[in-house]
Image: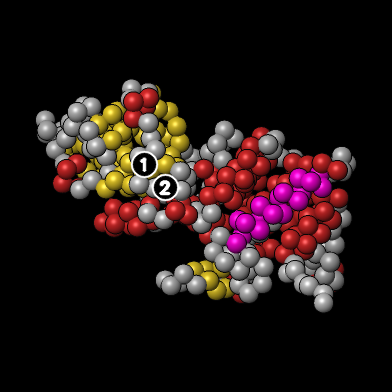
Amino acid sequence: MMRCATLSASALAYCSREDYAVQHIILIAQEVIMNTIPNAENCPVILQPTGLCVASNDGIDINGLFRFGCGYPRLAKDGRHAWVLDLYQRKAIVSGKALACDVPAIPDGDSVVRVKGRMIDGEAGPFIWVRELLTEPVIGTDVCALDLVTPSWVVNQDVADRLCEIWAGLAPPYRELINAVMEDPAVLQGFLKAPGSIRHHDAVSGGCAEHSLKVARMAIAIADLTPAINRDMLITGAILHDIGKCIEYRENNHGRWSMSRFGKRVGHKVGGALLVSAAAKRCNILQPEQVEDVLHMLTSSFAPTWAGYRVPATREALALSAIDRLCGAKATSHQ
């Protein structure tokens, strides 16, 4: 979770990295923010991507979802209590300002919030003058959960772009299921940052998301050639088949990954099934048989049935099993 005391320093650190596609960041001293009033002439922002078009954004009404970072208490010149807010999307870092009478309580850090207000052009750059700030319990199907992250969570923006595009092509129930699985910020961050494995395929930070994209792309190709396959179900399984690795692996302070206690005792297949099953119950939009088929895709294996696994018994499960093995296999050359 992001801490108020270290936000500015950490934000400046990660925003300077090209990997996060947020460049040319301007940091405004905290003292400058104090004792300001809501007008277009004296309202600096904390962080401003210079790619934002100030002229076209000034005065635009805002009603959208953001990942909430932190809120800083301040006093306006007239003595009223106010807030300076850190708001994030995957490719945007935006400062918000609000009077305490409009926003009496600050949400938990890393929660998804709905922001209603207006874009204001200040001397130091644009910011959102927030009139309403509410925690959004359910993301819904209009925006992908992968777009509601802080840039520091993303190892590869191109991979996230492609996954969001694939998500947008799914039927609403499956879009909602994926968002519900990634509702927990720890799960979402883990999916984006975890490796595909420790010593085998995609064994680098961000490898889990990259491997999932490879599997999803191949699933699309197979589904296009096989009308009998449930396309949305297969692609959903492809995106979520390794979601359990967000809790199977852990990262130390030096950026190295290892197996977590959960990973050693339970593993990512069972972990992923638990996450998907809980999300499906919260959504309650798929039929029980559909949920069972999704779980079957995630957990079936060609291991002996006496070991507790079930052999893939549906077209979708057979396809996903083959695709996963193919995408996870290391290439070998024959001399």
Span of residues in magenta: 207-223
Asked whether residue 217 is drawn in magenta, I would say yes
Q: Which residue is mark 2?
A: 22
- Tell me the kind of residue under disc 1: Pro
Q: Residue at x 79, y 46 (%)?
A: 221
Q: Is residue 315 left or right of residue 139?
A: right
**Residue 143 appears in which quarter of the rendering?**
top right
Residue 99 appears anywhere in the view: no
Q: Which residue is mark 1?
A: 49
- Tell me the kind of residue under disc 2: Val
Asked whether residue 285 is drawn in magenta, I would say no
Q: Secondary structure at mark 2?
A: loop
Residue 25 appears anywhere in the view: yes
**Residue 84 appears in which quarter of the rendering?**
top left
**In the rendered image, the vertical position of residue 220 relative to residue 13, given as above or below:** above
Q: Residues within 10 Å of mark 1 (few under 14, many from 20)?
A: some
Q: Position of residue 235 (x, y in %)?
A: 73, 46
